[in-house]
Image: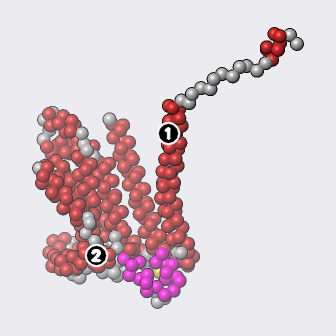
Amino acid sequence: MSPVEELQQSPPPLSPAAPPNPLRRIRLSERAGDRIFRWTMLAFGAMVMILAAGICWELMRNSKLAWDAFGFKFLITSVWDPVMEVYGALPFIYGTIVSSIIALMIAVPLGVGSAIFLAELAPKKVSNILTFFIELLAAIPSVILGLMGIFVLVPAVKSAQPFLTKTLGFLPFFQGHAYGIGLLTAGIILAIMILPYITSISRDVILSVPQVLKEASLGLGATHWEMVRMVVLPYARSGILGSIFLALGRALGETMAVTMVIGNTPKISLSLFDPAYSMAAVIANEFSEATSDLYVHSLIAIALTLFAITIIVNGLARLMIYKTTLSKGRRS
């Protein structure tokens, strides 16, 4: 072998080892940290989904006897007779939905109006003080509001019933005897409970409207009312809708205060003065007294129905907010 061939077949000389690049090491460590952070957050998010799915599964599994015995007629039957083992959830669904609608009819105008006043009209110090007390109202336990309902609201509704019957008695909603307890009282107590949610969230949303838009509308000659109606409310519409549906979800699931003033009578009546029953109230009142498996499964079936209604309401809220935001984006 010639010296030239030996030189070609000999291994190349070793190059000196390159010093470690500190920037590359930092990038690798950041990538690993980001990966750990992403998987950790994914695990937290998955836990929420697994928890919701687990609750749904347990409710379905423990209400099987009721669905097997009555099928979907369970949702449209108005008979609730534990002695004869005949169960229907319609009076409870009716009481829950009607009392929540009454609460929204009272709380939405008050809450949005209060939010506009606090955000646009009130001096800053007054606004901060009033906001503090409104948020404090949300921290009052529901059992205390229930006691207030019994000792204050029930006598007030009972004394106002003759006037309402005289002036609005041509409507079936304001006919009947004056018991004090009933759908109207439950709706009012629910309105008091959800009012802080609507007011506080709507105020924050209205405050987030860009100041330049308000000043531009005022500069074009709009009055303060026109600025609120044409600039502030359209801009904050999706947030205000979110606060209303959040409050509705709170009203649907409220138990203690409603139980103390609604009357706990499983019947369907158009009169707002008549006693009624809600889904959360019947579960709280009768679960410890349920003696048969079918009775227990029927109560859990009501809980599953309430869970489904809450999911549907929140889904519709998300859809409405999405459509509102989408249409606003197209206009802009």
- Which of the two marks, 2 or 1, is nearer to us in this view? 1
Instruction: Examine the rendering and report whether any part of residue 226 can be seen.
Output: yes
Q: Quadrant of residue 234?
A: top left
Q: Is residue 144 highlighted in magenta?
A: no
**Which residue type carries mark 1?**
Glu
Instruction: Please indicate whether residue 254 sits to the left or right of residue 312 in the image.
Output: left
Q: Quadrant of residue 77?
A: bottom left
User: Marks 2 and 1: CB-CB under 8 Å?
Assistant: no
Rendering coords of residue 169 (x, y %): 20, 73
Q: Earlier in the sequence, mark 2 or mark 1?
A: 1
Q: Residues within 10 Å of mark 2 (few under 14, many from 20)?
A: some
Q: For the residues marked 2 and 1, what is the alpha-carbon distance in whole angstroms? A: 51 Å
Mark 2 — residue? 143
Instruction: Give me the residue at 43% from left, 60% from top.
Output: 312
**Which residue type carries mark 2?**
Val
In magenta, the rendered stretch is 281-300
Residue at the extreme bottom: 83
Which is the main secondary structure of the residues drawn in magenta?
helix
- The secondary structure type at the circle numbered 2 is helix
Whether 44 is drawn above or below 277: the answer is: above
Instruction: Please indicate whether residue 288 sits to the left or right of residue 9 in the image.
Output: left
Count of labels in the image = 2
Mark 1 — residue? 30
Whether 41 is drawn above or below 282: the answer is: above
Instruction: Give me the residue at 52% from left, 47% from top.
Output: 36
